[in-house]
Image (cartoon, grey):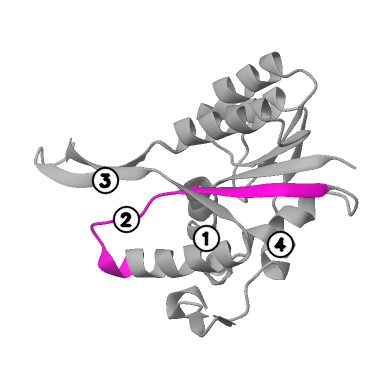
Amino acid sequence: MARIAVFVDGFNLYHAIDTDPALHRYKWLNLAKLARCFVTPSDDIKSVFYFTAYATWSPEKVEKHKNYVRALEWEGVKPVFGQFKRKDKKCLKCRQFYVTFEEKETDVNIAIRLFQTAITDLYDTAIVISGDSDLIPALEAVKQTFPNKKIIVVIPIGRRAEALKQVAHAHMKLKVHHLETCQFPDVIKKDGVTLKRPDSWK
């Protein structure tokens, strides 16, 4: 029996799903259930960490996101929050500046949590759900520092991540049937609180 910790790169996974309109109905994704798709029945999942940030400039998006985070927390998933930072960019065509937002801290937060939980010996195997090559240095460092621990990467739909695959001990691919079978019910109730799948996620 292996002890497992799962690290979900929330934005990398979200954008992989959001890129394809046919997959939008799978955003109401139960990450605790998804994690079990990549382990054996005898494995012991110690923690599932969800790395994300709220789009604070959009109250509607924040409300949907908070609703989703609460659903995850009810399943024992542990959110780890970064933040978006405002950035002024210049349009190459019209030469005018416009405001955009970039998510920050996720890579660092994943790296820190990977190390913290390795140091405290939470896991034998870390499963990282991401296709982001920026995580390569963190994975290499964990492998070098803790040679007895194993790292598996699960690549989201539409991502190739060849360099990331080379660093991990093993890799798997997230597929549509994983998304289909790991959805929350449309309506979830607990302790008098009701959570509903957003209409735009149906």
Magenta segment: 44-61
Q: Amino acid at mark 4?
A: Lys
The residue indicated by pointer 1 is 20
Q: Mark 3 and mark 2 in contact (Cβ < 8 Å)?
A: yes
Question: In this rendering, is residue 40 above or below 150?
Answer: below
Q: Is residue 59 or residue 78 the one in the foreground?
A: 78
The residue indicated by pointer 3 is 101
- Spatial CA distance of label 3 from label 1 is 22 Å
The residue indicated by pointer 2 is 55
User: Is residue 100 left or right of 143 when viewed as pictured?
Assistant: left
- Residue at x 49% of width, y 73% of height: 201
- Quadrant housing the N terminus: top right
Q: Is residue 174 or residue 19 the one in the foreground?
A: 174
Q: Earlier in the sequence, mark 3 or mark 1?
A: 1
- Residue at x 40% of width, y 69% of height: 64
Per the image, is 126 magenta?
Answer: no
